[in-house]
Image (cartoon, rainbow, N blue to C red):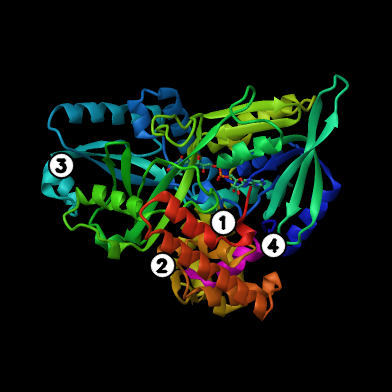
Amino acid sequence: MSVPMGPRAREAALRRLAEDEFDVLVVGGGVVGAGVALDAVSRGLSVALVEARDLAAGTSSRSSKLIHGGLRYLEQLDFRLVREALRERGLLVTRLAPHLVRPVPFLFPLRHRVWERGYVGAGVLLYDTLGGARVLPRHRQLSHSRALREAPGLRSDALVGAIKYYDAQVDDARFTMTVARTAVQYGACVTTRTKVTGFLRDELPDGGARVTGAVVRDLEGGAELRVRARQVINATGVWTDEIQRLAGASPGSRGSVTVQASKGVHLVVPRERIRLDTGLILRTEKSVLFVIPWGPHWIVGTTDTPWDLDKVEPAPTRADIDYILEHVNAVLRTPLTHDDIEGVYAGLRPLLGGSGSSSPTVKLSREHAVIRPEPGLVIVAGGKYTTYRVMAKDAVDVAVAGLGQKVPASVTDRVPVLGAAGFEALRNNRRRLAGRAGLPVARVEHLLGRYGSCVEEVLALVEADPGLGEPIPGAEGYLKAEAVYAVTHEGALHLEDVLVRRTRVFIEERDHGLAAAPEVAALIAPVLGWDDDRMRAEIDAYRSGVEADLAAQREIDDAAANAVRLAAAAPANQVA
Ligand SMILES: Cc1cc2nc3c(=O)[nH]c(=O)nc-3n(C[C@H](O)[C@H](O)[C@H](O)COP(=O)(O)OP(=O)(O)OC[C@H]3O[C@@H](n4cnc5c(N)ncnc54)[C@H](O)[C@@H]3O)c2cc1C
């Protein structure tokens, strides 16, 4: 049985935050912070992680959801970065998270006869080679007619042939939450809706100071906690500059790092609207555009534009949506229209360096930096989702050097995330599991891909109350038991957490989950101790967030969309 992250566990974790002194306090519950917590706790250190909103509420739920080396970094001749990322991809697919990280085939349409096949072919061959042992199938060259057989939705004149290659994909929000839960299994103290508002310091004999912890506000109860730690590791992504200011350093000065945000938008459209057997990668004038299979949907994106407005809910605009439609429609036999769009989401890339909103961000590498601006404080920033584990290891290595004791090296390349152990055996027994729970086999397969071996805990809820084995009305891709499990075990505290990140109803349903919201609120209310007023308030807050998002998408420029989105921001969502 896993250690649950429910309301009672949160109370206990808050008490620990107030009372204990930790070896490491991690600030930020994105994939990097969760990875840092797991790295540190699995070395035997005592660890706390505080997240201002929800696990993965920042960039880590808003990516393209690819675990990849990045074909375009090959073009920038960044072989080291590609090799490192492909090694991580291999580890995740085979050992660390085979239940959550899955191979996905992509088609790279070729537009020029001779040179492009050679050029892209050499790149993809190198990609396969850097990926090491045969973790994923190798690439294949496809003729024009063969490519059209695999991708009948493409215009015949949009390609002269294609290359098919493999990468991997993940539900980014679910993976981040699962890594954080894995840290909890090993003893880490993880809380959400707990925001760092300042740092604790001790004077040093030489007149300097060392960071000895952080001031943390519990955004649910309002209490202010002084959390003591021997090392604080900041992993706040695009909020890194704000944290540096809190620590008294100005971003860009000596011993600091600057993180520039770049907005990337994705659309979600129904699977039947694009006739394709694989994903698709298209060159654009600035970068690449992906069409990525996502259950009964496609995810199409992304854009890449500098952003210096609100970071909590970056707003997609009409211009972002039109850009994506225009580029994907250039190759589609039946163009997509605005009416095909089921969901839209925007995220902010934490790019290292850069100055001001006018500098181009496309050329910056996704590489990361770890700095120690002052004793007791380590900052890790940049990077990409795929390499979160390497970033985490590097950050903990630097923090360990400041602990003044012998600490084992990182073991996270051998620590599978929660749900990985036993997953394959359970998958082989999916028929038996389905029979026992009275569910269709396809449903159990879907659950296995979300929970791995923790599926037993979700199915136990159904066995105890067969009504929880029914699909959620308005969000039929998910069972009622999944909403309950999100609050009993996965740390969800609000309706938004369940509809946006524990499930992906917000981007998968045309109404963004508004029809499902009352039912989901009623399912989770008893666990979270909500009365009718609180339930109504949660539903209203969710509805106004959805309406603000839709209104922002009708605005043509960032400033107007941001103003519309900000006007509806719920207080619980305010971060730094
Ligand atoms: C559009 C887009 C597509 C991408 N696609 C890919 C891809 O396909 N593959 C890939 O490998 N990478 C991809 N990336 C990059 C990847 O998503 C990010 O590098 C990664 O998610 C960043 O994680 P993080 O933990 O650093 O930041 P975040 O996930 O943003 O986490 C930082 C956390 O810190 C919290 N926080 C902030 N201030 C405070 C405070 N004061 N106290 C406590 N907590 C605080 C925030 O709430 C947030 O949850 C993409 C990025 C974008 C934007």
Comes first in the chain, label 2 or label 4: 4
Residue type at mark 3? Leu
Q: Hey, which quadrant is residue 81 in on the image?
A: top left
Return the residue found at the far right.
205
Query: Dot 3, crowdedness within 10 Å: few (<14), some or many (≥20)?
Result: many
Comes first in the chain, label 2 or label 3: 3
**Which residue carries the number 2 mark?**
509
Q: Is 430 or 68 nearer to us in this picture?
A: 68
Judge whether 418 appears above or below 252 on screen.
below
Going 46% across and 67% down the picture, which residue do you hit?
547
**Which residue carries the number 1 mark?**
453
Question: Which stretch appears magenta?
Answer: 478-491
Q: Mark 4 to mark 3: distance in Å?
A: 52 Å
Residue type at mark 2? Glu
**Which residue carries the number 3 mark?**
159
Query: Dot 4, crowdedness within 10 Å: few (<14), some or many (≥20)?
Result: some
**Which residue carries the number 4 mark?**
6
